[in-house]
Amino acid sequence: MQLDEAKSRFIEGWGTLGSAWGVSRTMAQVHALLLVSVGALSAEDIMEQLQISRGNANLNVRALMDWGLVRKELRPGERREFFSAEKDIHRVATLILQERHKRELAPIMRVLGEIRQVEPSPTVSAEEAQAFTQMIGSIQNFAEFADRAAATLIKADENWFLSTFMKLMRPRS
Amino acid sequence: MQLDEAKSRFIEGWGTLGSAWGVSRTMAQVHALLLVSVGALSAEDIMEQLQISRGNANLNVRALMDWGLVRKELRPGERREFFSAEKDIHRVATLILQERHKRELAPIMRVLGEIRQVEPSPTVSAEEAQAFTQMIGSIQNFAEFADRAAATLIKADENWFLSTFMKLMRPRS
DNA sequence: ATAAACTTTCAATTTATATTGAAAGTTTGA
DNA sequence: TCAAACTTTCAATATAAATTGAAAGTTTAT
């Protein structure tokens, strides 16, 4: 396979993956393109390679910058902006986790905390109320656990965690 | 807060969470409704409580059954079908992980494996090809790691719950 | 065999989301 | 200051996804 074809396939695959996980296809594709590009790319480059409009390119590049996955690169003597992606995949994962925590986990946790205060009422049996509270409680517990686990991974910039657990999980390597 | 309001808020929140993660809002809402319902519900119940059409209810209930999150419950002497959700949150998490692994992780892993075989070509520099191969390789490694980590952490959480439960049951030993 | 009580399907429609492209805005250099 | 070289915005448009509802299909009881 040629490098160009390999890159296209990666961009396509990354886009598909993104849309399955609630990230817009184009945003994921811009990210993929920047990941496999050696240098930084201009808006024009992105427009051309992905065949998208200027506005669309701008929108998605800015969204990626909000996520911290892409940064602007200014070249002395050049007026236009270039963009490059964070290439360290561990940092990429960290940034994505942080952002998703903030945007999606935190809000649902707030809701769970609020709805757990169900008042006793004459129209519902005690056991029904309790079943509800238990369900919510177990979701809270699990979410907190998952959250802490993710945070632990985030803090594992040092390799001790990764190497320790990699050995546990990949006894063959 | 009344139980009914709490349930509504949960259903709404779960739906929002779902759509942020690539699950259709209604599917997540049907799931939420069944999670907080004590018994099994009929198609009619779901239609009424979520204000959706019969076709929509049927479609989403079947999708949830494909995920293994919901099962049909037949009552002797009743012609219609009832549906109930898996209530054990660890099983829920496990089922979701399994399914997403199968649907989304496995396909991208296949692509990554394929595109890593870039042929040398006179039109691309060796270092460009190598940068690409390294990028793909690090994504592969990370994906494998994350995959194992998720499975391991879920098991760890299950064990934690189990041991806590055992201690509660057998405080003396 | 027929009808009643359901479930399933799917073409049409609605709704939500992404995209465009031209205009407005901004920055830089002469 | 102006004009060139850019970036950003946003109303209009296109695309994709979800939803409806009625018809077709299925199962069960009589």
Image: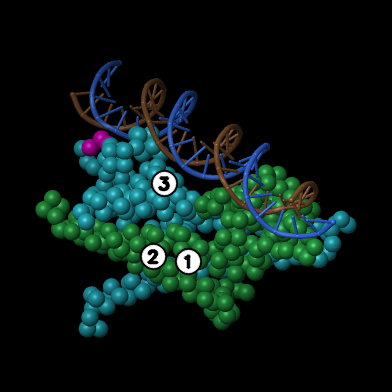
Chain colours: A green, B cyan, C blue, D brown
Asked whether residue A141 is drawn in magenta, I would say: no
Q: Residue at x 51, y 73 (%)?
A: A153
Pointer 3 residue: B25
Residue D6 on image: x %, y %: 73, 52
Q: Which residues make up the magenta segment?
A: B78-82
x 34%, y 34%: residue:
B54
Q: Nearer the viewer, mark 3 or mark 1?
A: 3
**Secondary structure that dominates the magenta span:** loop
Q: Residues at marks 3 and 1, common chain? A: yes
Going by the numbered disc 3, the residue's amino acid type is Arg
Q: Are marks 2 and 3 on the same chain?
A: no
Query: Label 1 is placed on what type of residue?
Result: Ala
Locate residue A160, reporting x and y percent. 56, 81
Disc 3 crowd, CA 10 A, few/some/many (<14, 14-19, 20+): many
Residue at mark 1: chain: B
Residue at 33% of width from left, 50% of height from top?
B11
Identify the residue position indicated by label 1 in the image.
B151
**Mark 1 on the same chain as mark 2:** no
Could you say which disc has been placed on residue A143 in the image? 2
Image quadrant in which the C terminus of chain A is located: bottom right
Which residue is depicted at the point 23% across and 75% down? Answer: B169
Can residue A87 be seen at all in this image of the molecule?
A: yes
Q: Look at the image and tell me whether residue B81 can be seen.
A: no
Please, what is the three-letter code of the amino acid marked with disc 2? Ala
Vertical relation: B91 (above or below) A5: below
Closer to the observer: label 1 or label 2?
A: 2
Q: Quadrant of residue D25?
A: top left
Marked residue chain, label 3? B
Q: Position of residue A99 (x, y in %)?
A: 51, 63
Viewer-proximal residue among C9 and B138: B138
- Name the element at disc 3: helix
